[in-house]
Amino acid sequence: MTKLRSVVRGCGSFLPETVLTNDDLAAKVDTSDAWIVERTGIRERRVAAEGELTSTLGIRAAEKALAHAGMRADEIELIVLATSTPDNTFPSTATAIQAALGITHGAAFDLQAVCSGFVFALATADNFLKAGQYKTALVIGAETFSRILDWEDRTTCVLFGDGAGAVVLEAREQPGEADDQGILSTHIHSDGRFYDKLYVDGGPSSTGTVGCVRMSGREVFRHAVVNIAQCIEEALEASGMKASDIDWFVPHQANKRILDGTARKIGLDPDRIVMTLDRHGNTSAASIPLALDEAVRDGRIQRGDLVLIEAMGGGFTWGSSLLRW
Ligand code: ACO
């Protein structure tokens, strides 16, 4: 029996120009390049310029994804933007992107699941497409985390960076088999008991301020390896696949030690991990589409490849998706 699947037609990404190296940070807070590289794998990250907003980055990534897909903006019916750093409290930054792209039909909204945002956004768009409600979607992850960092807190300011990535999805009938093209599975989870392990200490309803990122790094680390492994196993089981079937593992880029630990636990070949965090840092919801785009553009990910994405973030939230490129 045929199945409606969300097929990735194209991808794109955008990084701000300004590079902030570990040495630049060591000049501001008590840290060192050696500590950051050893504990996280991060060497540098990008920081948005004044006036460069989350929407600015998202628009650039979306334009590139549309060009890659060979589609016009007005062919897009749904825009889901994953971000924790919207331009304004409201309206959604997705509507600013929609307007900049000249789209006046369909729907555009933001989705907030912090670092898991792109997986949650992809799952959301996939469900609209599979249900036949929309035929096309633009799924974007865009962040300016530099705006919510406490630049005097060395335990958090060294970890994050700014950027954006996007994919264009199109609903297409597929034979309904394991080698179908498109999104084969999505699994998303939350457990609000860990709300205060990774959070921002401000907001419109609590303090009336924007606030800064606060994190219990060790707690996050401990849960990350367990939760990520669990949702990868879930994805493989749901699709009847094995770790050895995966061509490319494109994880959320938080910490190299988390990724290496996950790969060992699941039995994934380390050479099959797409890693960008050395140059991007943790760009939260933008990290997966940024990494996907890099691996597609440099020819690693080819049509027909089986790609696994996963993420874990504040909430806690976590999730995975298996897709055939
Ligand atoms: N430079 C130098 N020293 C530092 C720094 C720094 N930037 N940050 C912390 N330290 C110090 C600490 O103060 C501590 O010193 P002390 O022993 O004198 O008290 C020491 O280094 C060890 O600190 P820990 O927090 O135990 O270091 P750990 O090895 O756990 O590494 C890290 C910290 C990198 C944050 C790690 O816990 C981690 O990666 N956690 C996951 C968090 C994460 O990735 N969050 C992103 C969002 S969630 C997600 O995307 C999965």
Image: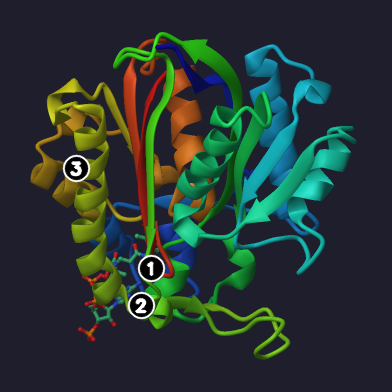
Q: Earlier in the sequence, mark 2 or mark 1?
A: 2
Q: Quadrant of residue 10?
A: top right
User: Are there few (<14), some (14-19), or many (20+) residues within 10 Å of tag 1?
Assistant: many
- Residue receiving disc 2: 194
289 on left or right of 216: right
- In the rendered structure, which amino acid carries the disc numbered 1? Phe
Q: Judge whether 304 appears above or below 161 on screen.
A: above
Front-lying residue, 78 or 89: 78
Report the image quarter containing ligand 1: bottom left
Q: Extreme bottom residue here?
A: 207
Q: What's the CA distance linking mark 3 and mark 1?
A: 18 Å
- Residue receiving disc 3: 233
Front-lying residue, 63 or 169: 169
- In the rendered structure, which amino acid carries the disc numbered 2? Phe
Q: Earlier in the sequence, mark 3 or mark 1?
A: 3
- Residue receiving disc 1: 316
